[in-house]
């Protein structure tokens, strides 16, 4: 227990570090934004990627071991208690004192308090228990934790995750698989105030042309095809990139903003479409910007390289071209592309099951405290003495019972 | 039009809360039960205005008012108020108000500083999970807020009781401890629910049910802290003072998860 609590505190501290220190940056970023010793420490301890560090996994495994051990140790006692812990015999041997005396048999009174199965284990005795399963709350919570961590961990190890982007009409392979996605349609639904209401991609997936299946994916509504889930992840701008010579098109392809294209006819020449502005303008300091997301004045910020050498960088507006020797390079017909995330996590259901178990277990642990009530008739005085037993809710049960007895027609004497 | 009505209602709620808070302070000085009782009534009236303000905003926006920083702050204050009122009327102790009302006022004050513009939701937020997730968060945070207030009463109890007049207004240590525990249990259950519904929603919207974004990470930290609280309390007998300190620290984490993460750390949740 103590070890587990220390683990919880260490895990919480690791999470703290992971949330305060930017994650997954390059070494240069850390040396730039932290003093030298701190940056060294961050990199040495793997604090730049806490949640994927080996020691974080070790901590999680230790927590699991501790949970397993703790549940194993407690299992026999729990089974024993479930089997015969709730019985009049066990109650009778406890040193409970009667809490009140009644003139008649209190079966109906017990029932009114939710003890639906009132037994008569012996003559002149009634006994009832409720929330017996409540003793399993903590145990199940730990089990749920285990299932959840297991599902998450296995998912991290086995999941497949890729992304595909394109414009309607394009077919792209899903990296790492034999499948290909054809983007049939991509629609951006706007509201009257020009904000985006929904992104919708209609797609077809095929496995090497043998089988195909189609679906529609939207934000918050992924579709599932061939066991993979397709998420509408994001969008961006791109345009047709053309290389011409003497009026004939030598190369044409769709280029997204942020992508690099090799100018095939000229060995070593590349064009980088650094940014796209649908509604181009210059800000106060002369920097390019877009006034809106409407496609009213498209402009392209490009960088031209020969090998490693930067030949030029400029903004092209409609109709402007780049000329290199006899070649004319241009961008035209801008349109938004869709970015689809493709994912398969075989252990998603396991993690969800773990979460469900934890929730149910917490309800049990907090709101279903096991309680027992019984009454024994004192033959000499002809009264029923009422007893209660509950580890967690004795006060409440005591109070409820007294109240219910007062309300009823019973002839009560309080102890 | 809706916005104007909401503005009036919100301002009225805030003013009445302020009055209630002030009266609770007055009660702390005078120990006159009448002041506390009126303060309780004022907070209740404020709660009615506040509820109406939320309803009007919801109707005006055509959706649940739980989507940007202002809406979540005002809903959060509403949740604290709801939990406060439940515990206040159930356990009937006036000193709770002295500590809970300022927390309430602080959060609604934070809400008042946010932009009240009604914006349409970005597609990722347009999900029925939003309502479930955020409503649960409101209850969880409200319950933790109450446990924090009760724990502060606990921690100050000895000092307050130097003045005999407090005696009839502050429950026994044991009762305070139990109320705080009940509030933490409620909060923990709801926090767990918040994290699970959040994960389901994140899976649908972003394709990953847990991506260690700062808000997720901080809710996990908060969850660990309250899990430690529950264990230490149950198995190591950490009742009373140490448990109370834990509950206050836990609520500080809750506040950071909510305010700090949005303003100080980058992440998916920060568009709110
Ligand atoms: C993050 C991990 C954990 C969570 C969320 C968790 C949750 C819980 C909860 C909710 C309870 C019931 C509390 C109550 O009824 O007030 C509990 C009880 C308990 N836990 Fe954990 N637990 C965790 C890890 C552990 C570990 C690693 C151990 C032991 C090695 C442990 C040992 C216990 C014990 C002994 C109890 C007392 C149960 C009883 O007496 O009924 N827990 N836990």
Image (cartoon, coloured by chain):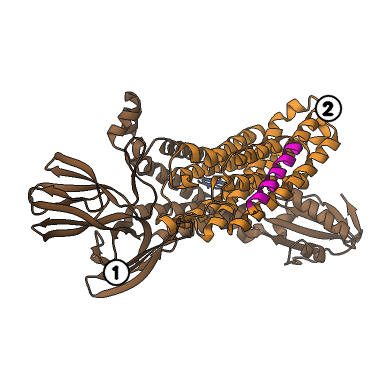
Q: Is residue A385 magenta?
A: no
What hue does chain B carry in this figure?
orange
Identity of the residue drawn at 60% across and 35% down: B246
Displayed quadrant of residue A58? top left
- Residue nearest the viewer, comparing A212 with A193: A193
Work out whether residue A225 can be spotted: yes
Chain letter of the brown region = A
Residue denoted by label 1 = A205
- Residue nearest the viewer, comparing A79 with A339: A339
Work out whether residue B187 can be spotted: no
What chain does badge 2 belong to?
Answer: B
Left or right for B211, reference A166: right
Q: Position of residue A241 (x, y in %)?
A: 20, 56
Q: Position of residue A231 (x, y in %)?
A: 37, 60
Identity of the residue drawn at 80% across and 44% down: B41
Q: Residues within 10 Å of mark 1 (few under 14, many from 20)?
A: many
Q: Position of residue A316 (x, y in %)?
A: 24, 48
Judged from the image, the secondary structure of the residue bearing numbered disc 1 is: strand
What chain does badge 1 belong to?
Answer: A
Label 1 CB sits under 8 Å from any ligand 1 atom:
no
Q: Which mark is residue A53?
A: none
- Residue nearest the viewer, comparing B175 with A135: B175
Q: Position of residue B52 (x, y in %)?
A: 70, 53
Q: Which mark is residue B164?
A: 2
Which residues fall within the magenta stretch? Answer: B3-20
Left or right for A276, reference A119: left
The majority secondary structure of the magenta stretch comes to helix
Q: CA distance from mark 2 to mark 1?
A: 77 Å
**Tally of marks:** 2
Left or right for A170, reference B218: left
């Amino acid at each position: 227990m103590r070890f587990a609590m220390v683990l919880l505190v260490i895990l919480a501290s690791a999470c703290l570090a992971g949330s305060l220190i930017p994650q997954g940056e390059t070494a240069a970023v850390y040396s730039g934004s932290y003093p030298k010793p701190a940056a060294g420490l961050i990199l040495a301890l793997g604090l730049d990627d806490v949640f994927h560090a080996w020691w974080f996994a070790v901590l999680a495994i230790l927590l699991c071991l501790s949970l397993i051990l703790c549940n194993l140790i407690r299992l026999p006692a729990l089974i024993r208690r479930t089997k015969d812990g709730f019985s009049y015999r066990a109650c009778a041997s406890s040193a409970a004192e009667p809490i009140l005396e009644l003139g008649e048999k209190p079966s109906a009174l017990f029932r009114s308090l939710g003890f639906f199965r009132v037994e008569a284990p012996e003559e002149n005795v009634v006994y009832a228990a409720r929330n017996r399963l409540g003793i399993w709350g903590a145990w199940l919570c730990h089990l749920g934790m285990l299932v959840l961590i297991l599902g998450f961990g296995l998912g991290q190890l086995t999941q497949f995750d890729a992304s595909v982007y394109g414009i309607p009409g394009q077919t792209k392979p899903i990296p790492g698989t034999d499948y290909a996605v054809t983007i049939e349609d991509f629609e951006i639904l706007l509201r009257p105030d020009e904000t985006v209401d929904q992104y919708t991609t209609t797609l077809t997936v095929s496995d090497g042309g043998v089988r195909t299946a189609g679906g529609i994916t939207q934000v918050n509504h992924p579709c599932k095809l061939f066991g993979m889930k397709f998420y509408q992840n994001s969008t961006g701008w791109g345009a047709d990139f053309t290389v011409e010579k003497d009026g004939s098109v030598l190369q044409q392809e769709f280029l997204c903003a942020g992508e690099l294209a090799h100018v095939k006819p000229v060995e070593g020449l590349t064009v980088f479409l650094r940014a796209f502005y649908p509604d181009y303008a210059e800000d106060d300091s002369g920097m390019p910007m877009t006034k809106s997301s409407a496609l009213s004045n498209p402009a392209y910020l490009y960088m031209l390289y020969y090998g490693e050498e930067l030949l030029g960088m400029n903004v092209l507006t409609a109709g402007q071209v780049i000329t290199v020797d006899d070649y004319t390079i241009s961008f035209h017909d801008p349109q938004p592309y869709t970015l689809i995330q493709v994912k398969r996590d075989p252990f998603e259901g396991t993690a969800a099951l773990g979460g469900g178990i934890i929730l149910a277990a917490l309800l049990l642990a907090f709101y279903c405290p096991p309680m027992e009530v019984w009454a024994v008739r004192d033959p000499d005085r002809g009264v029923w003495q009422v007893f209660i037993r509950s580890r967690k809710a004795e006060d409440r049960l005591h109070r409820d019972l007294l109240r219910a007895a007062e309300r009823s027609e019973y002839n009560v004497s309080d102890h | 039009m809706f916005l104007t009505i909401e503005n009036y209602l919100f301002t009225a709620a805030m003013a009445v809360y302020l009055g209630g808070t002030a009266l609770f302070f007055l009660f702390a000085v005078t120990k006159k039960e009448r002041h506390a009782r009126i303060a309780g009534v004022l907070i209740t009236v404020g709660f009615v205005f506040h509820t109406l303000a939320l309803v009007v905003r919801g109707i005006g926006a055509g959706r649940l008012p739980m989507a940007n920083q202002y809406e979540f702050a005002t809903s959060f204050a509403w949740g604290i108020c709801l939990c406060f009122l439940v515990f206040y009327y159930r356990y009937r102790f006036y000193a709770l108000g002295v500590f809970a009302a300022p927390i309430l006022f602080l959060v609604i004050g934070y809400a008042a500083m946010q932009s009240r513009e009604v914006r349409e939701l970005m597609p990722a937020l347009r999900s029925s999970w939003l309502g479930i997730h955020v409503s649960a968060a409101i209850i969880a945070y409200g319950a933790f807020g109450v446990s924090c207030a009760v724990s502060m009463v606990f921690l100050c109890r000895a000092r307050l009781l130097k003045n005999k007049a407090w005696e009839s207004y502050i429950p026994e240590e044991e009762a305070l401890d139990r109320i705080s525990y009940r509030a933490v249990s409620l909060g923990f259950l709801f926090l767990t629910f918040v994290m699970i519904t959040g994960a389901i929603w994140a899976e649908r919207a972003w394709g990953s049910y847990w991506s260690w974004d700062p808000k997720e990470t901080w809710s996990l930290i908060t969850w660990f802290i309250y899990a430690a609280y529950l264990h230490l309390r149950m198995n190591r007998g950490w009742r009373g003072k140490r448990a109370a300190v834990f509950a206050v620290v836990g609520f500080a984490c809750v506040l950071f998860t909510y305010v700090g993460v949005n303003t100080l750390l980058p992440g998916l949740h920060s568009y709110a």
